[in-house]
Image (tube, helix red, strand yellow):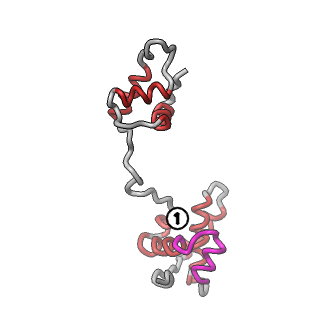
Amino acid sequence: MAMGKKHRVELTNIERTYAHKVLDCAETARGFRKRASILIMLDTGVGKPESHEKIAARCGVSTVTVWQTAKDYCEKGIEHALAFQKPENPPRPAIVTGEKEARIIALACGEPPTGYARWTVRLLTEKIVELSILPVASRETVRRTLKKLNLDLT
């Protein structure tokens, strides 16, 4: 399947100026600059654009990115085509939800087990599984939960 000419990009003068402004701004993220470059190179208002493959090679992206940028521009406009698109659904649901997070924090702020001066991430992980707060837990999950709230075990 050729990902080519279905979505025709013809920027208005205002959109072209906006795309150039995005490119020229020092604080613009690399991904935004690449998509702005793609739109400028795909613009049929200034001449015949190069192939998607050539544009992809010049911008350092895949041909799918070129095609998707053109599609986003045609369907939703330049702001959407240049903006960061957060996925609607995360790749997997969060393991630690609000109620479980509260129980983990309460446990970490409580008294450490007998024979220990303080909680460690390893001890917390074992206790969380023992108390069935989470069916399984990795030390990294517990560490990230504590770090999110700037909770230090020392």
In reply to whether residue 148 is colored magenta, the answer given is no
Residue toward you, 120 or 84: 120
Residue toward you, 79 or 52: 52
Mark 1: amino acid: Leu
In reply to whether residue 55 is colored magenta, the answer given is yes
Residue 104, image x and y in percent?
39, 28
Residue 130, image x and y in percent?
36, 27
For label 1, count other residues whose C-alpha is less than 10 Å away and answer few (under 14), some (14-19) or many (20+): many
Image point 46% across, 33% down: which residue? 142
Q: In which quarter of the image is the C terminus?
A: top right
Residue 123 lies left or right of residue 22; in this view the side is left
Image point 59% across, 83% down: which residue? 51
Mark 1, residue position: 82
Which type of secondary structure does the marked residue at label 1 adopt?
helix
- Please tell me whether residue 17 is drawn above or below residue 150 in the rendered image: below
Residue 28 lies left or right of residue 109; in this view the side is right
- Please tell me whether residue 108 is drawn above or below residue 46 in the rendered image: above
Residue toward you, 114 or 43: 114
Residue 33 lies left or right of residue 81; in this view the side is right
Residue 24, image x and y in percent?
66, 63
Image point 45% across, 37% down: which residue? 138
Residue 21, image x and y in percent?
62, 64
> Which span of residues is magenta-colored?
50-65
State which quadrant residue 13 falls in: bottom right
Identify the main secondary structure in magenta: helix
